[in-house]
Image: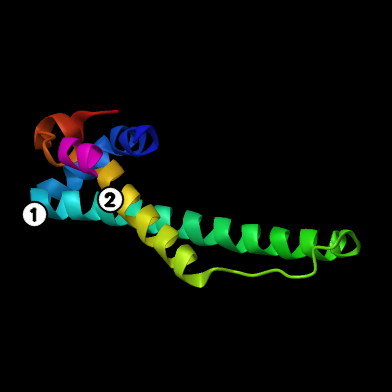
Amino acid sequence: VNTLALSVFERTREIGLLRAVGMLRSGIRRTIVLEALIIAVFGAVLGMVIGVAFGALLQRILASEGIEEFAVNVPQLALFLVLAAVGGVLAALWPAWRGSRLRILDAVAAE
């Protein structure tokens, strides 16, 4: 939430300009939530790829210790991806609401 709130704060002027040229409050909210969703899904996918690669590497290193099999639970990874997406959207709700409530003149005048 802090990263998204900081992002909204840093882009106050841009949000004000978008509102000034006609973007609705719902459009601002949707944009911020979509940004959070993309960040969450990208982070989850990257984490899964690194985790699976690290697990496969460890299995090969520890094969002499009796760990001969490496299994990836795809349904569990899919669940984690969905949970990351839901978490990203939930984390974006407050910053999105704050960003959409900015007054146009105050936002455009912000530095």
Disc 1 to disc 2: CB gap under 8 Å: no
Q: Which mark's residue is nearer the viewer, 1 or 2?
A: 2
Mark pair 1, 2: CA separation: 24 Å
Q: Position of residue 97 (x, y in %)?
A: 16, 40
Q: Residue furthest right?
A: 64
Residue in front for this viewpoint, 45 or 106:
45
Which amino acid type is marked by label 1? Gly
**Main secondary structure along the magenta-highlighted residues:** helix
Task: Answer with the quarter of the image where residue 111 lies.
Answer: top left
Label at residue 89: 2
- Taking the spot 11% from the left edge, 46% from the top edge, the residue there is 20
Q: Position of residue 66 (x, y in %)?
A: 84, 63
Q: Which residue is mark 1?
A: 22
Left or right position of 62 against 16: right
Q: Position of residue 106 (x, y in %)?
A: 14, 29
Q: Secondary structure at mark 1?
A: loop
Residue in front for this viewpoint, 86 or 37:
86
Which amino acid type is marked by label 2? Val
Left or right position of 23 against 6: left
- Taking the spot 70% from the left edge, 68% from the top edge, the residue there is 70
- Does residue 27 lie above or below 110 as drawn? below
Sequence-wise first label, 1 or 2: 1
- Taking the spot 12% from the left edge, 47% from the top edge, the residue there is 19
**Residue 94 colored magenta?**
yes
Q: Which quadrant is home to the N terminus?
A: top left
